[in-house]
Amino acid sequence: MPRDYIARFPVGRDALEQVLLRRVNKHQFAENDPAQDAAKTALTKVLDDLEQEGAFSATVRLTKERDSLIKRGRSPRVAMRKLAEKGASRDALDDLGAVDPEIEFQAALTIARKRRIGLYRRNPVDRAGIQREEGILARAGYRHDIIQRIMETNADDLPDV
């Protein structure tokens, strides 16, 4: 169960311990039941083993969080800023490395689809409308080359997903 949770959600040791302790405490133990103490001891041992394996690595957790934000349409710059706001250290963020430009393009497509701009627009727009759409993507933190690619892409050019 803890490995599944760690694989699905980027989490630190303390947060996972709280989640699992809530599950232990939810169980209806009798008062002063030694099974409750045994469950908490086993939980601590499992968490220690996971920590020894490196399951709570800050770099792995930050990478998962960054990738999750990008999949939801955030630009890599905005994702890094969000992680910094959450308290990630500058060194840890520097260790993450650059994001693949294709992944950034997919994130920009996500926001274009949500905002119905670029190839997802319903009605043709004039030059002012195109500039407005480019401004939306620029304020979302996307690089100029990605914005141009979004604006020039046709539905036929997209890979089948």
Image (cartoon, helix red, strand yellow):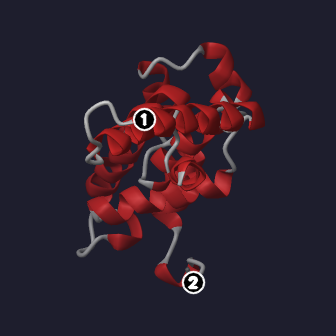
Question: Residue 146: x percent and y percent?
Answer: 56, 51
Q: Which mark is residue 34?
A: 1
Residue 143 appearing in the image = no
- Among the two numbered marks 2 and 1 on one chain, the one whose residue lies closer to the N terminus: 1
> Which is nearer the eye, 130 or 14?
14
Q: Which residue is mark 2?
A: 160
> Which is nearer the eye, 25 or 155?
25
Q: In the rendered image, which quarter contains the C terminus?
A: bottom right
Question: Residue 101: x percent and y percent?
Answer: 66, 51
How far apart are the alpha carbons under marks 2 and 1?
Answer: 57 Å
Q: Is residue 151 above or below residue 65?
A: below
Q: Is residue 5 left or right of residue 113?
A: right
Where disc 2 sits, the SS reads: loop
User: As shown in the figure, which amino acid type bears the numbered disc 2?
Assistant: Asp
> Which is nearer the eye, 102 or 145?
102
Q: Is residue 23 left or right of residue 122?
A: right
Q: Is residue 83 left or right of residue 33?
A: right
Where disc 1 sits, the SS reads: helix
Q: Is residue 23 above or below residue 148?
A: above
Question: Residue 59: x percent and y percent?
Answer: 67, 31
